[in-house]
Amino acid sequence: MCLWRGARYMTNLPRLIFTLSPGRCGTKYLAALLSTVPGVHVEHEGKPDFVDWARAARRDPAEARLFWEREKLPYIAGLGCDVYAETSHLFGKGFVQPLLDLGIVPDVLVIQRNHRDVALSYWRRGSIPVRTMMGNRYLLHPEVAEFHPPARWWSFSDYQLCYWYVLEMASRTIANIDRLHEAGATVHLLRYDELAQRESVLGCLNGMGLEPGSAAFDAVFGQRYNATPAGIVNLMPPGDIDEQEQGVVGAIKNADDVEPDTRIKIDIVVLSMGMLRKELAATLMAVGYDRRYNIISGFAATDPTSNNRCQICKEFVDSERRPDWLMMIDEDQSPNGDFLQWVESDADVISFATPCWKPATSPHSPIVWNVQLNEDNREFAPTVSNPDVTVLTNMLPDEPVTEVASAGTGAILIHRRVLEHPALRAPFIDEFNEFGIRIEGHDLAFCRRAREVGFKVASVLQNPSSHYKTIDLLDVVRVLRT
């Protein structure tokens, strides 16, 4: 068994139990049932979380192994429990074989549920692969299909994307079971409907050598966890559901006979520390249905911000789907209008002009735009006393996208060719003088370095990004008085 940071083997890992399922199979309820067994530490989707490493793991199994070695196993070893059980369905999305490669063989419980029921559950809750934030974060993209790549998946209905995901996960589960059996793992099977049968649950737990406390088990058994809300539990997708499922099966069978998707590929990543605004959430929801482009969106949360941006850029460049454009959006912003259309311009870096509030004590109060118009102006400018963007655009040529010296990165599009350039391998780093004093922030420095190697940096001035900030109203009064 592998140990973190230096030593090759650890001897203090407890017995490990994980689950394989597509999700929406009662795994949170299962976690509650397992928690009634003395000596078992149970987590449903515990930290360190598989989902934070899932995209990297799909790209490179070495990343999944790194997650086990540096994050998950050290955490588990430090718990001091006899048995560690986790019921996250993310385990089956690229983490099984890397764990086996470390010589660690867990016990696994497979939860089986009718394909249609799982797909409907995801559809009813709005977790749609590709098209919604939750679907992108927790499910799979058709372009990374291992077993069932579908033809023209972008023409699928929301339900069809959910149904395709379930079929893909079913085949992945079978493959993972084969890997586990080959490694000598004990694999247990439990049907979803058996979770409601007391004897079936107890029989499964006893078969795993687990004996729940009777009083604790009785208190948990039959309770509902993470259930679909009553108001939507009977909703059905529009159209004939049988025809939609048959359409997915047909698209899988005909995948090799259809030309590949040639649309521009865009990765949208929100730099979020858990404060996503409803305005941005609505914007991203709408973008998920824009079929002009091949879009995938997700979250990233790492401190400091410059490190977060560099990590996002590295994952973008290394991505197996090789997207054309990366868009980064801060959690306190929300681009407006048809902001993706600018990927068809001739610019390499496209920032969206953003108003920034300055207090009454600032010489630039109350608003400064995050655009550096030319080399002579070393600060974001121009400073204006009116937050109306026309004050800014009237000073410039009447062009929707205007070439600038530098611009902020709160909402920014960057073409792949920029991030692949050797001079920009570390794209977002602050610049310091010989005394260690910062002279240029990572956003300005990135734009300057991009221009120095021949890339065009531009700003969308006609359609600025909304910027949401908490402001002291007394400071607003002071500004108005002046």
Image (cartoon, grey):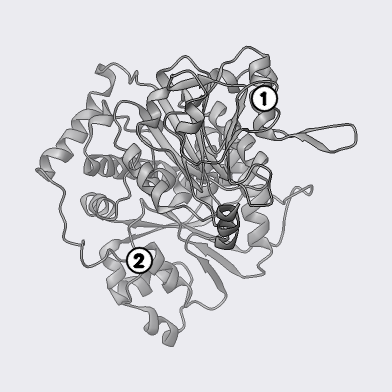
Disc 1 designates what residue?
425
Q: Quadrant of residue 165?
A: top left
In the image, residue 277 above or below residue 285: below
What crowding class fits label 1: few (fewer than 14 Cα within 10 Å), some (14-19), or many (20 or more)? some
Residue in the image at 64% along x and 21% along y = 374
Under mark 1, the amino acid is Arg
Residue in the image at 38% along x and 36% along y = 141
Tell me the element at label 1. Answer: loop
Q: On the rendered structure, is 326 left or right of 68?
A: left
**What whole-number distance in Å separates the C-alpha atoms at marks 1 and 2?**
43 Å
Residue 89 coordinates in the image, percent (x, y): 42, 53
Disc 2 designates what residue?
226
Q: On the rendered structure, is 214 left or right of 156?
A: right
Q: Quadrant of residue 121?
A: bottom left
Please tell me the numbered disc located at residue 281: none
Q: On the rendered structure, is 200 left or right of 451?
A: left
Under mark 2, the amino acid is Asn
126 and 76: which one is in front?
126
First in sequence: mark 1 vs mark 2 = 2
Residue in the image at 17% along x and 40% along y = 245
265 and 373: which one is in front?
373
Q: Is residue 424 visible?
A: no
What crowding class fits label 2: few (fewer than 14 Cα within 10 Å), some (14-19), or many (20 or more)? few
Which residue is the extreme one toward the left?
240
Q: Is residue 68 visible?
A: yes
In the image, residue 159 above or below residue 105: above
